[in-house]
Image (spheres, helix red, strand yellow):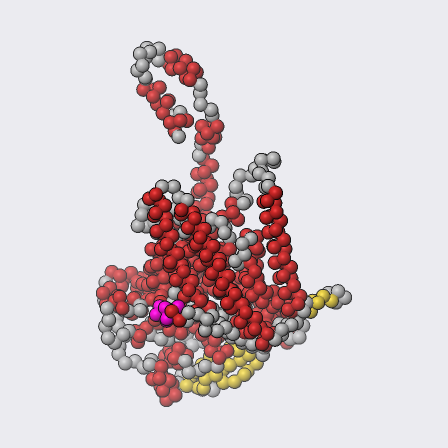
Amino acid sequence: MGEVKTPRQWFLWSIALVYVCAFASIYVQIPGLYGDEGILPVRLQMPKVQRPLLEQESLLGLGPFLGLAPQQVLELTCLVGVALALCAVLLEPLRDSLIYFLLRLLYLSLYNVGGDFLRSEWDVLLLEAGLLAVLVAPLGLLRRRSSYRYHDPVSFWLTRWLFFRLTFSTGVSKLASGDPAWYDLSALSHHLENQMNPTPLAWYGHQLPDWLLRFGAVVVLQSEIIVPLVTFFAPIRRLRLFGFYVQLFLQLYYILTGNCSLLNLLSITLSFSLLDEEHFNSNTGPKKKKGQEKKPGSCGQMVSYLMLLVELAVYLFILYCFITLFKLQINWEEKTLSSKTNFTQKEFHAFLEVFQELTIWIGVLSFTWEVVSAMLNCVCTRGIVSKLWSLIQWALITAAAAAVFALSVVPYTSMAGMSASKVLPAVQDMYSAVERYQLVGAYGIQHRMISTKGRPEIILEGSYDGLTWTEMNPMYKPGNVNAVPPIVGPHQPRLEWLMWQAAQGGDDTSPWFTGLLQRLLQGKPEVVGLLQVDKAQYPFSQKPPVFIKAKLYNYHFTDPTKDKTHLQAWWRRQYKREFFPIVNLDDPTLEKLLEKAGLKEKFPAQTGSDTPVSQAVSLIRDHVKGLSGSLLLSTLLATLAGIFLIKAVFSWFLGGRKPRPASADHKTRKPKEPSETAEKSQAAAPSNRGGKKDSNEKKDSDKSPRKRK
């Protein structure tokens, strides 16, 4: 693979932008999730025995030193993370290894105390991608300047390996779990309504013909299993570009139909590892005139023809997998395409057993190639000192990259259908020793069976008398069947995500769900704000309900051709069962669940002292109070876009005012002949014939092309 200067910069810029979205999204939800009046107060997780700060797994131990309450420590952590990430987005010199180390440290601190709300796949992926950003980014803040290093392709290769593991494991888990919806190719139709936050476009996509949705399921499986196998580590750059655009198209589809999540943003960020410098410079470099191009020799032509044949063979192999594995047949009369899975679950597990070790060895060979290439570049460096320094850097980065690669093999082999028995015991012991730092993650293991009976949803209802019940419709998930599916954006509503998972799993005894019911019965505005920011949309904004219960419904997208009575609705639903019985604050059942979850008030809330830091954190919280997470992130991203637009306009305007023709003349003007220079000097200063030069002549000579060079 060629140089990776520009793809590396795109990766670092995108990681910083993802950090901005992640920290800001969590910050908005802290009072309702972890505040003193929240669902799971973070003060209950404070260690009873004070330990040294370096031995703690979070930054909560800084609270007493800064005069902050536990909730304010979390808020300060998010605010510092947003500030650092914004600086890295706006200023290229701050995309430094030290900055990314601090960002990962802050996010790991939140992850360790976040509980169920921060145990999603995208949180684990952000922590691992953040570690790679530390290795990929230059260490320029401690030096005067940072430049491209010969070992950068070695560290940047880890992002491609992570992208392969993420994509391949996601695709494999769909079939290895035995999900019948993917084996009968009806998964895409159900996925459009079963995903976490469907958009209005998902409704329109659900109306597409059944044969087209089945073909879409085939495309998804091919894009996540076959395409990464044959393109991500291919030595031919056009194949890697093909894999990049396939994955980019797939992520854009997920964003348009299921909102933009951190998982989609991180997938696009990691996909830059498939690009190289030539891809960015091909359209901007100077075009050679006709006849100036170097014609390759006979040997070069043979190599190019061979690479073209290999490339065509790969495309034909992908097409062959389309036709044979899924029995694609075109019906020309009805203008439809039929598809059917042509393998069993047992045969797919046999496929995994073969390709498990093969993919790891492909990674080893690809990594070795990058290491050897980087070493040769270091050896060819001019100067003994530069050569020695480059080799030392190469050795350190190679050792770190090899350790991360070895650790990643352990969770990679833990996906469904694979066995970790072939992993060296020493590597497994090393992984167990550093597992709490979340250096590497496992992906695809959280795959849930797609429900073919509709989208299960938990609907909360409140009442004052136990007879008349009113629904509490949330902002970010289906409730009212006539409500338009929301546009959430990169904001990650953590409560809705857990309610979506609980509806699929049927778990009604989780500590967070018990805490939610308690806070709603108490009418805590911090928790109510998680469900609905607009008080007019919340039926119990004036007085909290006396009784509360939860029901489970199955939601389906409406079909205009079948649901004649639901023409104005986006959803239709069917009652399934009771999810949680009727409770009030004095109910013994609720008391037992609270006691079991450790949510009973055992000590009063801790308040921070009146320090400048505490005042600043409280002031910022007062300014964002009442804003929804999607609105805050949209405003933040719009501000960033405006700054970049203004910067581009000023750059264009100032660039247009520069005296570029004059500089061009200096570059193209030939040096004057010595005789001509002598004649002009004699005419200008006839009295200086004895060798003394006039000051004006000296200034002119300083402006000559040779002096300028």
Name the residue furthest front: 299
Measuring from the top left, give residue 345's x and y in whole percent. Answer: 58, 76
Q: Please report the residue visible at 36 percent of the width from the left and 25 percent of the height from the top.
A: 702
Q: Position of residue 277 (x, y in %)?
A: 49, 48
Of all residues shown, which one is farthest toward the bottom? 588
- Image spot of residue 420 (x, y percent): 46, 72
**Quarter of the image with the C terminus in it:** top left
Q: Is residue 130 visible?
A: no
Give the residues drawn in magenta, as a range: 427-434
x and y percentages locating residue 157 in the rendered image? 45, 56
In the rendered structure, does residue 524 fall within the stretch colored magenta? no
Judge by depth and name the residue closer to the eye, 698 or 438. 438
- 431 part of magenta stretch: yes
In-front residue for pair 402/321: 402
For image coordinates 64% across by 67% down, the residue present is 215
Q: Is residue 338 left or right of residue 379?
A: right
Q: Extreme right residue here?
A: 333
Q: Main secondary structure of the magenta part?
A: helix
**Left or right of 37 on screen, residue 286:** right
Query: Foreground residue, 9 or 473?
Result: 9
Vertical side of 522 occupied by 92: above or below: above
Say left or right for 366 vs 516: right
Height in image: 129 above or below 590? above
Whether residue 426 appears in this view of the structure is yes
Q: In the rendered picture of this protein, how many numbered marks are placed on residues?
A: 0
Task: Relative to 694, say whether 146 is above or below.
Answer: below
Question: For the point 26% across and 72% down, which residue is it?
Answer: 606
Quadrant assignment, res 593: bottom left
Residue at point 42%, 57% (across, down): 15
